[in-house]
Amino acid sequence: MRIFLALAATFLAAAIPAQAEELTLERIFASPSLSGPTPRLLKLSPDGRLATMLRNRADDRDRYDLWAVDTSTGQARMLVDSARVGSGGEISEEERMRRERARLSGVRGIVSYDWSPDGRSILVPLDGDLYLAGLDGNVRRITATPQTELDAQVSRTGRYLSFVRDQNLYVVDAEGRNERRLTEDGAGTISWGSAEFVAQEEMDRRTGHWWAPGDRYLAVARVDEEPVHVVTRTAIGTEGTRSYQQRYPAAGTPNARVDLYVMAPDGSGRVKVDLGADPDIYLARVDWTPDGNTLLVQRESRDQKRLDMLSVDPANGRSRVLFSETSPTWLNLHDNLRALRDGSLIWTSERSGFSHIYRFRNGRWTQLTRGNWAVDRVVGVDERGGRIYFTGNRETPLEHQLYWIDLARGGTPHRVTETGWWNAAEMDDAATHALVTRSSPTQPSQVYLADSSGRRTAWIEENRLDASHPYAPYLASHVAPVFGTIRAADGTELHYKMLSPLREPGRRYPVFVQVYGGPGAGRQVTRTWGSPIQQYLVDRGYIVFSIDGRGSPDRGKAFEDAIYHAMGTVEVQDQLAGVNWLRGQDYVDPEHISVYGWSYGGYMTVKLLEAAPGTFAAGIAGAPVTRWELYDTHYTERYLGNPASDPAPYLASGAIPDAGRIADPLLLIHGMADDNVVFENSTVLMGALQAASRPFEMMVYPGATHGVSGEARQLHLWRTITAFLDRNGRADERR
């Protein structure tokens, strides 16, 4: 490894100019991406001969096409050119909302695809219609309708294609013929075969129908939104204002009614699944056993403190509870269930305090991994070879590695990826090959094919930082982060990441604190490739600093549970612990520490300004939650409970009561069509600040949803942020 790194350094020194070009905002938000190719949705073909992915274009980084790489030769070719094949028409409002739920609002071209089980073709939704792509480059259109076909799938044998149109479920044969509508009453508040809002937004469940092995059965969700309260939304766009009625399940209000049915591929033999006597539950996950004879349903209680695994007879819908998980706070949903051919189940649970792998067999549990570290994702199970492959953070919470353990005995995990990297992986059904995606602070995302031992057999996307790489002109000034730890007020160890300019003795530097701070996602302190924005700020003389406080994931359940019924408390205190540590460093300008965050990070920014007035030179809050009563049921009640029965945690966690304490410069940013953290969160805060005579600055984006997308608008956003920073976040002599 040392020899390889030395040779690589020698090559780069010869190929890349020692003097870096100036990194500008204009270049950061232009194409091609400075991070190089960023493939999405990597999959292996059923026979393992091809690795497929969605790859963005060099001349349009937000447009994705379908590509395939020969795993034996490494040769890449485009299978579907989205610009040539698609109609280029506007996507429907329903498709737009689905993309927003999946955080794909700025993506164009192909956003999903599904391999046929025989490996001969790929189902590709594009511009509202469906296409079947052959491996020979031939692309055949399956639907050509004015309506949008959603949630398209290939059945388990490949005999059928299924999709949702006009809120009903349809099935056609693999050639696109013999179209059948399986449901009849999808209209108004009723829909079949699609995931409801909270399932898509908060539960990571994107579908509402599931094919059984052998195609004998199809499980289908029926959603009725009639109980969900109607709210009036105003989407202010660049060409006018549109008001519309939306059914939105705000915290403490009714959810949609979700039922589950099983039917044949032609819609006959429909039976209703017994989900229990309480209708106020969440349909969390649906899976089939390998023989197709049992449906496995995860039923979650409304308070998210109990999850029941139901075993369902698809012939009559009768169910029984196989096992239950409980928690005094909340349960984190996951996709780690694997049903094996011998009837046992692979499962992950946080019952020990950390996420670990268990095997459930004949009513008994066997714990296969253990320790003060967390399993992230079960990637594959090799039943023949007796191995389970998974990603986790056994070495350090700063990294994810790929491991395997013995299927029968568990024991010490065997790591098959290199430390120093953040790794993710996908495996084929037999778990004999893996597609590994990795990055580090000094290397943007790479993808390679590995065998079951972890040995790299082919590059799928090397993304080498050579002279031809888009980032090459700026590499000479690239700053790698320094990682370290500090202690929270209660002694808890907290990890931080810091990028600094080349320090001059005696000089003090302004600091840009980037924060998220929320549970479940959004970690800032990882050994991954960072945003070029951070390098831009370092080039301008800022130290960029982040800390992962209590409430963030990957550190065990107790670490995350610290925010239970207490959002806006300990996670704010931990950020302030980081700021106080910074103020004690002789290279930090303690009078010029700024904080920036988006979404939960925007909420954190506001709460930090309220908690410590006079501490920050500037605060930039993007799309902040300010009243948790405005947010949805599944996310908010998970952490704060139900406000209908216990409003106290909501009152304590909100950002409005203390808005008058804000004394430091604040820039508030929000999209005017945000249907996630709705614009009302910012208007309520604006009113509270004005009522307290507190000055602030505001930038709104007409038509923008929860993120500001598009190269031009992102450039405008960061010009606005950096101008605000330059006015407030640094000493006069550095402006």
Image (cartoon, rainbow, N blue to C red):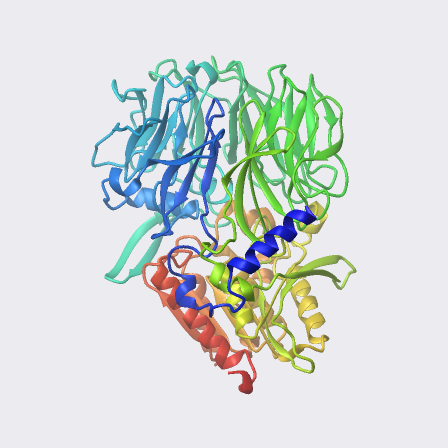
Q: Is 173 situated left or right of 463 in this image?
A: left
Q: Residue 529, image x and y in percent?
A: 56, 54
Q: Nearer the viewer, residue 460 or 306?
A: 460
* Quadrant in the picture for residue 307: top right
> What's the residue at 52%, 57% (across, down)?
628
| Number of numbered discs on residues | 0
- The residue lying at 38 percent from left, 30 percent from top is 193
Residue 167 horizontal/vertical position (percent): 31, 33
Task: Please indicate, yes or no, whether residue 554 appears anywhere in the rendered image.
Answer: no
Residue occupying the far bottom of the picture: 733
Question: Where residue 172 appears, x then y in whole percent?
Answer: 30, 21
Between residues 47 and 108, which one lies in front from this camera angle?
47
Does residue 66 appear in this view? yes
Q: Quadrant of residue 680?
A: bottom left
Up the image or down, 16 lies above or below 359; here it is below
Give above or below for 145 relative to 505.
Answer: above
| Quadrant housing residue 338 | top right
Q: Position of residue 289 (x, y in %)?
A: 55, 19
Viewer-proximal residue, 671 or 538? 538
Question: Toward the viewer: 129 or 87?
Answer: 87
The relative height of residue 678 versus residue 169 in the rendered view (above or below) is below
